[in-house]
Amino acid sequence: MKYFVPLLITAATVVLIAIAWVNSGGMERERMRSSRTSEEAVRLLLTQAQARNWDRAHALLANASDVEKSAFVADLAGSNGSLLTFANLENFDLWPLHKTDREASMRVKLHYSTAVGPLEDVRDLKVQHEGETWRVVWPTTTVARVAPQVIPVNYLRWDIINRGAEDDWGVQNVDSPQVRILSMNALQRPDRIVIVGEVVNEDTVPAYVNVGATLLRPDGSTFAQESSFDKISHTLLPKQVSPYRIDFPEARMNQVKSVRMDVKSLLVAASADPVIEVSDQRLQTDALGKNLLLGQLLNQSGQVVNIPHVVAAYYDDSGKVIWVSDGYVDQALLPQIPVPFAVDLPDDVAPKVHNYHVNVNYFNVNRS
């Protein structure tokens, strides 16, 4: 009898632990560990990557011996201070493309959250059947390594010397650079008014530029104010042109009589390095039917560019700017190693595009 109460307590504890395990998804996790279907194999792999259990995720690969763990991690979580290194894999969607008894193809859509907004990545993965389980075959990528080399530095550079605290009170700093809006085109989109155009730095010194717009009602009062935010190349070297785009969510043209444009500039220190070459540009439709402008970026300098930002302007056959799109590249640009980029454009705009121009600006982690 003296052992009855301890045994009863032990049994009750085991039952409660089992109930808690089931309620917390333990059975589901155990079922997923078996990867008895191709969908479960992909879901399990991405769940481990989402939790940053990289050892476990890498071990789940069918070709783990052929895939460098560092390359696998860089593929999903970034490297060299790229945008993905500051991102979180929030969730993912997956659906089958093709399946037999021995292999399957799965399409996954990864949803990342970043400091500059959501980032999506669509991939097609091969899954193969091994014994009683399915495993993902990961593309055999390797970590990009820069070969030792000497790159001459001969770029232009502008520094700023401001008025010091002990200077005479009447001594002024350098005037703001002269910048001008080259064009402005107001568009009615299904859910907003969009203003697109181009701005130029007409001065002989670099400028940090921002373009703003104010929508005015028929009575002259202000309806809404917005700025280009990051849909522009903010730092413009002398004579450089940048596209810009300003969005007014939920605004309609019949609510507005006119638009007042405003451009502000600030003198900044800048250099013409790094030089980022844009090549292999083309308009194309992806596997999901989305219209994209694709291309490659090549960092021609000896510096690492952590977060490249692509801003593209699209023109009709008369040379008018009809759309501006932008996107952040999730990989860092190492010297002399090409990296692909893609920015999208609306379906109704794509058939009207006669030409386009790509600007690339960037953010570096150690840049002051």
Image: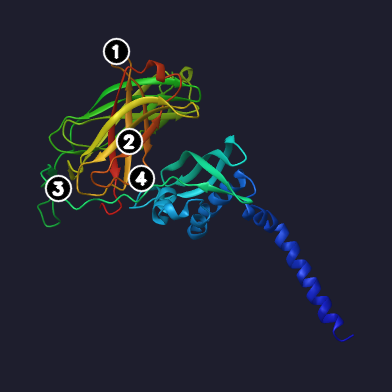
- SS at mark 1? loop
Q: Quick one: label 1 or label 4, which is nearer the N terminus?
A: 1
- SS at mark 2? strand
| Residue carrying label 2 | 310
Q: Quick one: label 2 or label 4, which is nearer the N terminus?
A: 2
| Residue carrying label 1 | 318
**Residue at 53 percent of width and 49 percent of height:** 46
Relative image position of residue 286 (x, y in whole percent) = 45, 29
Kindly check if marks 3 and 1 are in contact, taking CB atoms under 8 A apart as contact: no
The CA distance from mark 2 to mark 4 is 12 Å
Of the residues tagged 2 and 4, which is closer to the observer?
4
As drawn, is 55 to the left or to the right of 242?
right
Relative image position of residue 65 (x, y in whole percent) = 44, 55
| Residue carrying label 4 | 331
| Residue carrying label 3 | 151
What kind of residue is marked 3? Ile
Whether residue 46 is visible? yes
Q: Nearer the viewer, residue 184 or 340?
A: 340
What kind of residue is marked 1? Ser
What kind of residue is marked 2? Val
